[in-house]
Amino acid sequence: MSKVLITGSQGFIGSYLCAEFLDKGYKVIGIDNFSKYGPITRPHDNHPNFELIEMDVIDLDPENLPEQLLDVEYIIAGAAMIGGITYFHKYAYDLLATNERIMASTYDVAIKLHQLGVLKRILVASSSMVFENTEVYPTPEENIKVCAPPLSTYGFQKLAVEYFAKGALEQYGVPYTIIRPFNCVGVGEEDAIGEHEVKSGNIKLMMSHVLPDIINKILKGQDPLHVLGTGEQIRCYTNGKDIARGVRMCLESEAAINEDFNISTSVATSVIELSQLVWSILNPGKEFAFVSDEAYEYDVQKRIPNTNKAKEVIGFEAEIGLEESVREVIEYMRQQSE
């Protein structure tokens, strides 16, 4: 039974990763300090092959590691200070500084375990935000070599994550795989501690990301619906289960060693189209109307990945459609509000 360390295991994407790897028979060690959501329970918590170490990744000492980590074969570096567009602006410095410290600490551990002959590979969670300034759509992985670097501190730090991987390979021979998920959607996203309170029309933004925000406003009866900017921003909303499966397929593929992958659906959807879908489910037969709120500076207009490499190299394709994901999140949010 292979052992995997997942940092940020109790987070939104982290919980999907734990579920995927546990379901496929892996032993999973999670590290999380509950800094984003506060104390929270996840479905994987009581799984017999899961163990949680409650601590800050930054505090890991490679010379004095917890015993549970001494035989870890793979690290999935998912811990990060992360949020939606309001987060990017309120915590512009903290996002950069904290995430650099998290990644440096994670890589210190990876290097040590690799030197001990234990670690086979580290998989690092980058972001579609590294392509913030691309002019190529759909965007292939190799475009990272030529597009201008991100302007947001979050995007720039995620680009730095990729250089941690390349630097550790060059100096210490630590194999890596870079994962770039695009706009994860699904259940389990909660209000973040310290979330910046912003009004969107008559309703306070409750969530970090666009789908739960739209659902929240429509559930509360907002009409017309307030959207950031024109609503023409295009994203590829990918279910967390698909992203987790893609990460596992990367880990299990020798062809993914020292490579980078866009892990995403290829279906592009505008914010208005997403809003209309949610509206049609929650307000069937009612005419859709919206108004535009002022957009944020780093609200990138397009994020559309080329997914051919993931399909050809590791055999990954997203399977869960947007409507299924939307209905899943609606049901989850209704249950949470009861």
Image: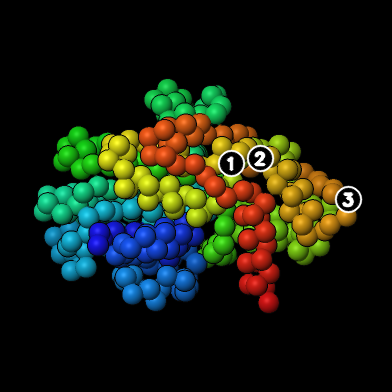
Q: Distance between the residues labelled 3 and 1?
A: 25 Å
The residue that appears at 71% across and 36% down in the rendered structure is 232
Q: Which mark is residue 236?
A: 1
x and y percent of residue 110 in the render?
22, 51
Q: What residue type is labelled 1?
A: Cys
User: The residue under label 2 is which amino acid type?
Assistant: Thr
- Where residue 158 sits in the image (x, y, percent)? 41, 42
Q: Are marks 3 and 2 in contact (CB under 8 Å)?
A: no
Report the disc number at residue 269. Answer: 2
Q: Are marks 2 and 1 in contact (CB under 8 Å)?
A: yes
> What is the secondary structure assignment of the residue under circle 1?
loop
At x 38%, y 39%, the residue is 314
Q: Which of 239 and 200 is in front in this view?
A: 239
SS label for mark 2: strand
Among numbered discs 3 and 1, the one appearing first in the sequence: 1
The residue labelled by disc 3 is 287
- Left or right, 123 with respect to 302, comes to left
Disc 3, SS? loop
